Image: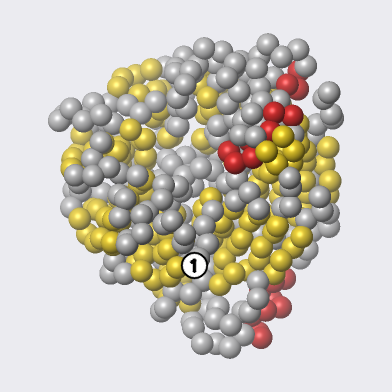
Amino acid sequence: MHVAQGVSRSVSRPVRNMLRASLVPAVVLSVTATVSAEMSSWTQGGADAGRSGYVGGSLTLDPLDIEPAWTVELGFSQSGTGSWSARAVATDGAQVYRVALSGYAPGGDYHVMALDIDTGQENWDTIIKGSAFKGVGEPVIAQGKVWVNHAGHSANQAELDKPQLYSLNTVNGQVESRTTYSAQHGESDRPTTDGTLLVAQAGYYGGMSAFRADDGGTLWNVSGSQSVSPAAALTDQYFFAYDEGVYSRTTGAFIKDVTDPDGYSLRNPTVNREGGLFYRTPNGVSAFDSVTLGHRWNLDLGESIRAMAVGDGKVVVFTPNWVRVLDDSTGAEIQNYFSASEIVYGEIALTDSHVFLQDIGHTIAVDLETGDESWRVDDRGEMALGDGYLFLSNHAGIRAYAVPEPGSLLALVGLGTPIFLHRRK
């Protein structure tokens, strides 16, 4: 039986910066930390429309010492695929957004939540009922709205059981739009957005659609794979999807397949903000111009690439035990870092000075200039870095680690026991 959807539970919002205002004067100033450039928000998977993992900000800390700021324990009982497929967060500078399942995935309650970014205090919680194992996907932020993808089957009789893209108001959590699209496999993949449109998997026999970020209206739909997510990366001119495919951002029309001159297969397109387009090959990286689509360089590392991030003139690639920092214009290696523990695939967070990664049991920051490990914590989860915080999110909850605000001077050593906020079940 279907329950009402889009019902919001609001709580009072605390004054922003309350945490810092109350804690900073009491600490011992044993470590000084600065950020020389502002860190952007983490609005979606891969941080931005290019799926680059890059958020900017140059951390200057000696030693790098990021301390726990707050922890939110979710406390939901959950089972089924949806219980582990939607754990990542998004940020917009004021709030952190997360989707969490309560109950059994196909018919459970999916809590779309907004938490104060400085304190972890819940500001609102809107429940959307699931109708497929993939439930409701991870959040994306565009034009002052939270967007989530609701999995379903077009043949379902109940309108709210069909595949739909939801938008919610970031202030109060009220549902602002629901766009129904055609699908039969119950996917809830996270859309990619450039702030004006969202591209997501859609189509009864596979494919993808673009939706307007102001009202959710459908712009176009193109055919594509039923079994593979498009994993689109967007630029002003194109979007890159299904690995080698290049499509018109305006119309969705297929333009061409990008081909490597040495015959390497290309996977996982990633775009930086300086006109570079980068692909993983079976054992390395292949680089192109994202405007002309001309080839720039190849690099064969002799081992598989597990993940990649690009930004600030660098390409950072991860193999099972190595982090390699490359010059994005030539592919020349600038620096490297060896990890004794196997590096685990997942989100990568790249700043101008450090890269954040995870091994089997830790989250680690590596200095891009020296190749040295600057910081580690015995903690893991879906990672996001933005707006002065590192977030680690898993089935149990969300943990935030404070990174100093741009241009500030803060001492983070000795902050003491992290704050724990317990949610109502």
Tell me where residue 361 appears, x and y as whole percent: 47, 59
Up-down: is 162 above or below 381? above
Tell me where residue 64 appears, x and y as whole percent: 44, 74
Tag 1 secondary structure: strand
Is residue 385 at least partly visible in the picture? yes
Mark 1 Cα within 10 Å, few/some/many (few <14, many 20+)? Answer: some
Up-down: is 183 above or below 320? above
Up-down: is 183 above or below 23? above
Image position of 48 (left or right of 268)? right
Image position of 264 (left or right of 232)? left
**What residue is pinned by disc 1?**
377
Q: Give the colour scheme of this rendering.
A: secondary structure
Is residue 173 at least partly visible in the picture? no
Name which residue lies at 36% across and 35% down. 269
Name which residue lies at 73% across and 45% down. 77
Tag 1: amino acid: Val
Up-down: is 324 above or below 227? below
